Amino acid sequence: MERKPKRNLEYRLEEIDGELLLFHPGDTKMVYCNQTASLIWQLCDGTRSVQQIIDLLAAAYPEAAESIAEDVNGTLQQFEQHGAIQLQ
């Protein structure tokens, strides 16, 4: 939980046809993102730990606090599998 996710700067988050997509322009890798995933992506700046990201989102969305840790970990795992982040 103390690892710090850092975005791969080659990936872009853009809205295309009403959908949020995280993609690598020079590759065929693409990840569909909901609003929560886009927030997580924006928080992956290499300075915040996974736990800090969970805490920030839990404070912003207290009604969803019980599921945020699982959502954040799952989203980060998906980002890492696609090469969109590195966990330092």
Image (cartoon, rainbow, N blue to C red):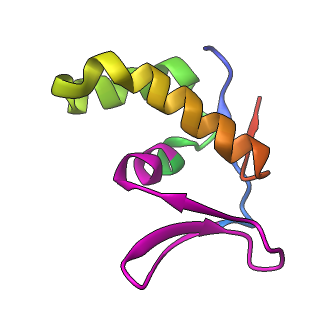
Question: Is residue 6 shown to the viewer in this render?
Answer: no
| Residue 80: x %, y % from top left | 74, 42
Q: In the visual, does 74 lie left or right of 38?
A: right
22 to 16, vertically: above or below: above
Residue most extreme to the bottom: 17
On whether residue 22 falls in the magenta region, the answer is yes
| Residue 3: x %, y % from top left | 68, 21
- Residue at 66% across, 69% down: 23
54 to 27, vertically: above or below: above
- Span shown in magenta: 12-40
Question: Is residue 77 shown to the viewer in this render?
Answer: yes
- Residue at 74% across, 55% down: 8
- Residue at 76% across, 52% down: 82
Q: Number of labelled discs?
A: 0
Which image quadrant for residue 21? bottom right
Residue most extreme to the left: 63
| Residue 2: x %, y % from top left | 63, 14
Q: In the visual, does 51 lie left or right of 84?
A: left
Which image quadrant for residue 1? top right
Query: Which quarter of the rendered picture does the C terminus lie within?
Result: top right
On whether residue 20 falls in the magenta region, the answer is yes
Q: In the visual, does 50 lie left or right of 18?
A: right
| Residue 67: x %, y % from top left | 35, 22
